[in-house]
Structure formats: C-alpha cells, structure tokens
Amino acid sequence: MLQIRTILTVADNSGAKKVSMIGMTKKGNRTYAYLGEVINVAVKEAIPYGQVKKGDVLPAVIVRTHKEKRRADGSYIRFDDNACVILAGPDVKDPKGTRVFGPIAKEVKDNGFSKIASLAEEIY
C-alpha cells in the first residue's frame, strides 16, 4: 500500500535508483496503490549514462511493498522494501530494463506483466 510521495527503490537496470510516486495512471484521485498496479513515478536518483535521467516522469509497476497484502487463500505476503519496475511506455506492459533484481509478488504476473515475471529471480 503506497501513497503519493512514497520513495521506492527500482528493481531493474534501467538506470534509476530511487523514484517517488507522483500519481496513478488512469485511476483519478485514488490515494493508495497496491502490488501489481501501474503508477507514475518521478526519478530522484539515477546512475550516469543510464536509460533514464533524474527528473524523468515514467510509468512503473509495483513489485514489492513493505505493507502486507492479504491473498485469497488467507495468507499474507510482505517484503523488506517498496520497489517498482519501470515500464517502456504508458500502455506497454514490458519493462524498460533487461534485468529484474530481487523477488517479486505473484500479483504482478496475475495482472498481466508476464515479461517482468519471467525476468525475475523468484516469484512469491
């Protein structure tokens, strides 16, 4: 569960290191975002000569949240950090980077981001 101005780490090799959530794509004025949802982010830290630069506004999908998420079978999933993967475009479900670091939630694959799920080290 993330809200506006939340700082997230980037779990891919697109060049961004830290981003800030600035809104939700096509969701109006919703206040919270959950696992597997697309959000708009502003890049706060980036490596030099990366694909993205500081200040860029990009779409991203949430792959890890510190706040636990209840699943339909009654179990809960929680991670150590808040993380996202930057997408190639606003209506594209493919990642901008070529690698995904760390585990991702099963909800990401269930929402149609199968390319991100195939690049991930492990899926919980």
Image (cartoon, rainbow, N blue to C red):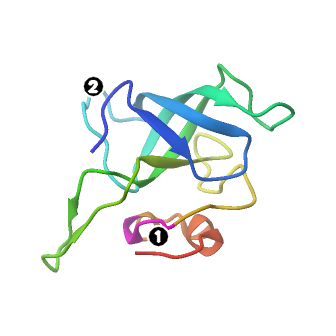
- State the residue at coordinates (31%, 49%): 34
Q: Residues within 10 Å of mark 1 (few under 14, many from 20)?
A: some
- State the residue at coordinates (60%, 27%): 43
Work out how far the residue at label 2 is from the one at label 1, CA to CA, in angstroms. Answer: 25 Å
Q: What residue type is labelled 1?
A: Lys
Image: magenta residue range: 103-107
Q: Residues within 10 Å of mark 2 (few under 14, many from 20)?
A: few
Q: Do the residues labelled 2 and 1 touch (CB within 8 Å)?
A: no
Q: Is residue 60 positioned above or below 58 on the image?
A: below
Q: Is residue 15 positioned above or below 23 on the image?
A: below
Question: Would you say 34 lies left or right of 20 here?
Answer: left
- State the residue at coordinates (72%, 51%): 13
Q: Does the magenta stretch include residue 64?
A: no
Secondary element under disc 1, as helix, strand or loop, is helix
Residue located beneath label 1 in the image: 109
Most prominent secondary structure in the magenta stretch? loop
The x and y percentages for residue 39 are: 45, 38
Residue sitting farthest toward the right: 49
Q: Is residue 80 positioned above or below 49 on the image?
A: below
**Residue 50's disc number:** none
Q: Quadrant of residue 50?
A: top right
Residue located beneath label 2 in the image: 29
User: Closer to the N terminus: mark 2 or mark 1?
Assistant: 2
Residue sitting farthest toward the top: 55
The x and y percentages for residue 91 are: 58, 45
Residue sitting farthest toward the bottom: 73
Q: Which amino acid does label 2 sit on?
A: Asn
